DNA sequence: TACTTTTTTGAATCTATTATGAAGATTTGA
DNA sequence: TCAAATCTTCATAATAGATTCAAAAAAGTA
């Protein structure tokens, strides 16, 4: 299992990252400030570091610099919009990638997967996920029913992905919003209905997605 | 046993929550205002906090803020409909989830289970409950007799669930109404009869549910 | 047995939730 | 910057499920 060090002082975001990435199958360690980060870092080898820039004690730049002296572990920086982004570009970019807040989990997961793939020079075999005659290419964001390529929008793809990773479990609209949308999204939860409708239409007759009235949606367990 | 702190000034709702969640197997502590809440909170570690927004002395927002400074324990907010809901959305959501009053216990229990699952990172295994050849999948809201999937409506499922968690005990119609319906329901208690009828029909010949004339219904203890 | 009370039942009605199409807003990519 | 794609909201229609009702059946009682 690949090991990720999350360095983030906002406990809410820290928890979000922790939960979601653990779900995604990574081994997670967290730190809330620069000093703690370096301490944790020296304790074991990580495959990737997620590093907030604004940190107590030692900021992200500092942490990154120290880490870089010892190793070339991939680093992804988390930046607020205002200016930090351009600073990163201005610096001689010791980080491998960066992502601006607020971000959504799927976007982050994609970046992580991309960076890890690059660094570990794994072959380009795409990760896939299947259900009945449905196949998702998780890296290419493509879906197939049988051999036929179904053209899904990113959002549709992510909803389908999430339902499939939790086969048999009912996901409420809130569940989906919390994991797939940026954590600052304050819109209507009815938006899920519309995406589900569009998904169903594109996926055709075999209606994989069940409605549980008053609760949410589910893709059944295969059996 | 997981520990929940309930902070709610309406004593009726407080009692409801206390009883139902205790039944559901949680270790419950209650507080009726913000100050008491923080006092109780500092006394022991909780796995989850249920927090009403409108509270005497210090309101829910304040309590949440203080708690957040010390820990990232999951918090679920209880809100009245009028405006509070949108306030929550407007705040930078330090809570993990919220539920609007009036709510029903099953809805709340579902949220609690979801939040705890996320935070404690239990695996994705479904919680199930069995009785003779009957099995309930509590996360998927599905029922099975043997291997056969029985298609129950949410209400039917919840009634069956409640009867099974109290195997051997007679539940009156009032009992069921109080725990499964929103606490503002003022309809006929005869509605239970109809749901029981439909349940029996769907569950088939083996009649799991006994009628205790003049009292209520029961599912017998296994032996 | 006759009478009362309670439960069961099927059908009718009502309601809340979901599905849907279309319009408007936003984002993305050229 | 503009155009196309996608996301989001909204109003309306469709419908599953919840609830009520009234009559029949069953259980208890004298």
Image (cartoon, coloured by chain):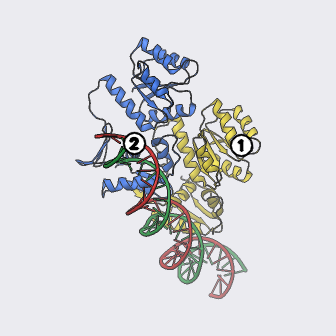
Chain colours: A blue, B yellow, C red, D green
Q: Residue at x 54, y 25 (%)?
A: A54
Residue A5 visible from this viewpoint: no
Q: In the depicted view, which residue is nearer to us: B211 or B143? A: B143
Residue drawn at x 63%, y 61% is B177
Left or right, B144 with reference to B48:
left
| Residue B204: quadrant of the picture | bottom left
* Name of the residue lying farthest toward the top: A69
For label 2, the crowd category at 10 Å Cα-Cα, with few meaning under 14, some 14 to 19 and many 20 or more, is some
Residue positioned most to the right: B57
Label 2 vs label 1, nearer the camera = 1
Depicted C3 relative to depicted A203: above or below:
below
* Image position, residue D19 (x, y; %): 58, 69
Dot 1: chain letter: B
> Which quadrant holds residue B213?
bottom right
Percent coordinates x, y for residue B123 in the rendering: 46, 37
Helix, strand or loop under label 2: helix
Name the disc covering residue A165, or none: 2
Q: CA distance from mark 2 to mark 1?
A: 38 Å
User: SS class of the residue under badge 1?
Assistant: loop
Q: Provide residue B63's location: percent of width, then percent of height.
A: 69, 38
Callouts 2 and 1 in the same chain: no
Q: Residues within 10 Å of mark 1 (few under 14, many from 20)?
A: some
Write the residue at 54% across / 54% down.
B161
* Badge 2: chain ID: A
Reading the image, the residue beneath label 1 is B59
Q: Residue furthest left?
A: A147
Q: Is residue A205 left or right of residue B169?
A: left
Q: Position of residue B199 (x, y in %)?
A: 50, 64
Which quadrant is the N terminus of chain B positioned in? top right
Residue B214 appearing in the image? yes
């Amino acid at each position: 299992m690949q090991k990720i060090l999350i360095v983030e002082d906002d406990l809410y975001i820290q928890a979000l990252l922790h939960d979601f990435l653990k779900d995604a199958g990574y081994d997670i360690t967290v730190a809330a400030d620069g000093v703690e980060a370096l301490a944790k870092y020296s304790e074991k080898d990580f495959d990737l570091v997620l590093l907030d820039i604004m940190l107590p004690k030692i900021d992200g730049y500092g942490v990154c610099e120290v880490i870089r002296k010892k190793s070339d572990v991939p680093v992804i920086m988390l930046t607020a919009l205002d200016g930090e982004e351009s600073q990163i570009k201005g610096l001689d970019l010791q980080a491998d990638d960066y992502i601006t807040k607020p971000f959504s989990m799927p976007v982050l997961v994609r970046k992580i997967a991309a960076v890890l793939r690059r660094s570990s020079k794994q072959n380009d075999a795409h990760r896939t996920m299947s259900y009945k005659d449905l196949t998702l290419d998780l890296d290419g964001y493509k879906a197939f029913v049988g051999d036929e390529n179904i053209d899904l929008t990113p959002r549709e793809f992510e909803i389908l992905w999430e339902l499939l990773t939790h086969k048999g479990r009912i996901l409420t609209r809130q569940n989906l919003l919390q994991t797939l949308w940026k954590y600052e999204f304050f819109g209507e939860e009815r938006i899920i209905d519309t995406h589900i409708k569009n998904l169903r239409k594109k996926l055709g007759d075999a209606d994989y997605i069940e409605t549980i009235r008053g609760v949410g949606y589910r893709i059944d367990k295969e059996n």
